[in-house]
């Protein structure tokens, strides 16, 4: 039994199903998609559904396989924490949101359990996260900024088809 290679996928937690994205990777290797999906869903049952987890599959020559699961990517954590759907088109010139250093620390604690980052200091992981945040147009501050909190409130009001004047007029 020797290793054929390493293949990386991003699969939503607890809801994996046979799909073209998974099939294109597993099919040529002779790995049963249904079996993989059942094993993956069983191992990620305690994770919030639809969280995009990074999976590394190591197929063996006897058509068996091993796979390891990692936490979501840094950018996914940062965008969720900053409450913005996507990064800035012009980072450095336009900010789309902000995260606090406390939030960066909590993300780093979660990411420190990933096998590639084991042994790396929390400070190093935090610095990496801060660099990723700046590169995607997310500001890192000590405290949450009021301008972004107000923008989030406006987004929530417009997404539920409310107008601020309707919710504030007291009638």
Image (spheres, rainbow, N blue to C red):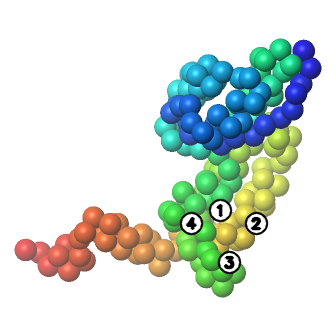
Asked which quadrant contains residue 155, the reply is: bottom left
Q: Residue furthest bottom?
A: 93
Within-10-Å neighbours for mark 1: few <14, some 14–19, many 20+: some
Q: Position of residue 136 (x, y in %)?
A: 67, 69
Q: CA distance from mark 1 to mark 2?
A: 13 Å
The residue where tag 2 is placed is 131
Q: In terms of image quadrants, where is residue 12?
A: top right
Dot 4, how many residues are within 10 Å of its Cα: few (below 14), some (14-19), or many (20+)? some
Identify the mark nearer the N-term, 2 or 3.
3
Q: Position of residue 106 (x, y in %)?
A: 63, 50
Q: Nearer the viewer, residue 100 or 163?
A: 163
For the point 81% across and 28% down, which residue is it?
Answer: 58
The correct choice, above or below, for 86 with respect to 73 in the image is below
Look at the numbered disc 2 and give the secondary structure of its residue.
helix
Distance from the alpha carbon under mark 3 to that under mark 1 = 19 Å
Q: Is residue 53 above or below residue 17?
A: below
User: Where in the figure is residue 111, as x and y percent of width and height?
Assistant: 71, 45
Tag in front: 3 or 1: 3
Mark positioned earlier in the residue sequence (1 or 4): 4
Q: Which residue is painted at 41% across and 75% down in the image?
A: 150
Q: Which residue is mark 3?
A: 91
Q: Give me the disc on residue 157.
A: none
> Which type of secondary structure does the marked residue at label 4 adopt?
loop
Q: Are marks 3 and 4 in contact (CB under 8 Å)?
A: no
Image: 83 above or below 66: below
Query: Mark 3 or mark 4, which has the lower sequence index?
Result: 4
The residue to which callout 4 is attached is: 86
Earlier sequence position, callout 3 versus callout 1: 3
- Give yes or no for contact between labels 2 and 3 (Cβ–Cβ under 8 Å): no
User: CA–CA distance between discs 3 and 4?
Assistant: 12 Å
For the point 87% across and 32% down, which residue is it? 5
């Amino acid at each position: 039994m020797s290793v054929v290679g390493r293949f990386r996928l991003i699969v939503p937690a607890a809801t994996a199903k046979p799909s073209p994205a998974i099939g294109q990777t597993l099919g040529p290797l002779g790995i049963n998609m249904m079996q993989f999906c059942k094993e993956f869903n069983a191992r990620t049952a305690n994770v919030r559904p639809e969280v995009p987890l990074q999976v590394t599959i190591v197929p063996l020559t006897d058509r068996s396989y091993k796979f390891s699961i990692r936490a979501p990517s840094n950018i996914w954590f940062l965008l969720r924490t900053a409450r913005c759907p996507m990064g800035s088109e012009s980072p450095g010139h336009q900010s789309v949101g902000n995260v606090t250093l406390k939030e960066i620390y909590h993300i780093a604690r979660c990411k420190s359990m990933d096998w590639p980052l084991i042994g790396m200091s929390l400070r190093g992981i935090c610095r990496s996260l801060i660099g990723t945040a700046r590169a995607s147009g997310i500001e890192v501050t000590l405290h949450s900024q009021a301008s972004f909190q107000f923008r989030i409130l406006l987004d929530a009001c417009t997404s539920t088809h409310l107008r601020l004047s309707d919710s504030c007029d007291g009638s």
